[in-house]
Amino acid sequence: MHAIDVALVGGTGLYHFPGLEAVERHAVDTPYGPPSDALVIGQLGERRIAFLARHGESHTIPPHRVNYRANIWALHHLGARRVIGINAVGGIRADMGPRALVLPDQIIDYTHDRLTSYCDVAGAEVRHIDFSEPYSARLRAELMGAAAAAGIPLLDGGCYGATQGPRLETRAEIARLRRDGCDLVGMTGMPEAALARELELDYACIAVVANWAAGCGEEAEISLPEIFANLEAATAQVPPLITALPARAD
Ligand code: HPA
């Protein structure tokens, strides 16, 4: 059996990876409890891909209740070494409007009361990971290359502000995030990225812009049907992007 070349954690709007063949489903148990759903493993051409729906395949788990520790542990346990989180976000920066795909390079974490570390277990060794660059530079470069090869527009860099949810933010909260330097806002980017770093996985996030964040667009309110239409259109670019990602030899 080939090793898993890349694992995807699908967010809102991406519950299955189309085109996978010889699909197996693995219900993995972990020391941290069950992952959001079964891990789906299949072939994409020559490569083995793992897929996990972050909110469950029927989207029943809100962002603050996702068992991030179990999800990342399970992917690592099955042998994944590079992991890509697909995260729906609101756009704050002027060039990051609905339907844009962005590869952020920084994070500010505003979440609270989430289990954020594998150290958070009695008796576990306490480790302080370096998180100056929260995403893998190597995987980000590979994704930028794949986007160029496939002709898919992917914005390189941006600061992801991770909020608690599940409600969307107030205009004042978004104004504060903008002042802080956030370009995007989403509810699921953390602690996933930090947990991946703790397990020494190569991790990157593809942020899919669903809407203008509160107060950033023309509309007085954010429309949910528009969010879903934008996500459907933008997320359709993710499978071809992953297909264009070269396999790793090492
Ligand atoms: N805020 C936070 N998370 C989101 C948004 C938003 O506006 N849109 C999609 N996910």
Image: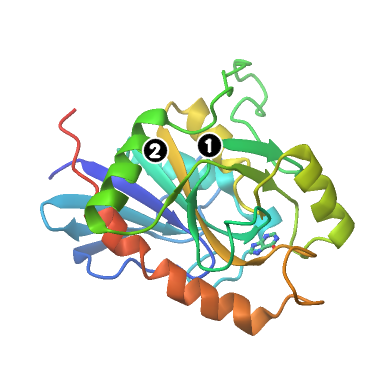
Q: CA distance from mark 2 to mark 1?
A: 8 Å
Residue closer to the observer: 63 or 144: 144
Badge 2: residue crowd in 10 Å (few <14, some 14–19, many ≥20): many
The image quadrant where one finds the C terminus is top left
Looking at numbered disc 1 in the image, what kind of residue is underneath it?
Asp
The residue under label 2 is: 140
Query: Which mark identifies residue 105?
Result: 1
Q: Quadrant of residue 23?
A: bottom left
Quarter, ligand 1: bottom right
Label 1: state its secondary structure: loop
Residue at 39 percent across and 38 percent down: it is 140
Q: Position of residue 104 (x, y in %)?
A: 53, 43
Residue at 43 percent across and 31 percent down: it is 136
* Vertical placement of residue 117 versus 159, above or below: above
Badge 1: residue crowd in 10 Å (few <14, some 14–19, many ≥20): some
- In the image, taking residue 123 as reference, residue 100 lies left or right, namely left
Q: Position of residue 2 (x, y in %)?
A: 14, 43
Asked if marks 2 and 1 touch (Cβ < 8 Å), the reply is: yes
* Vertical placement of residue 237 versus 140, above or below: below
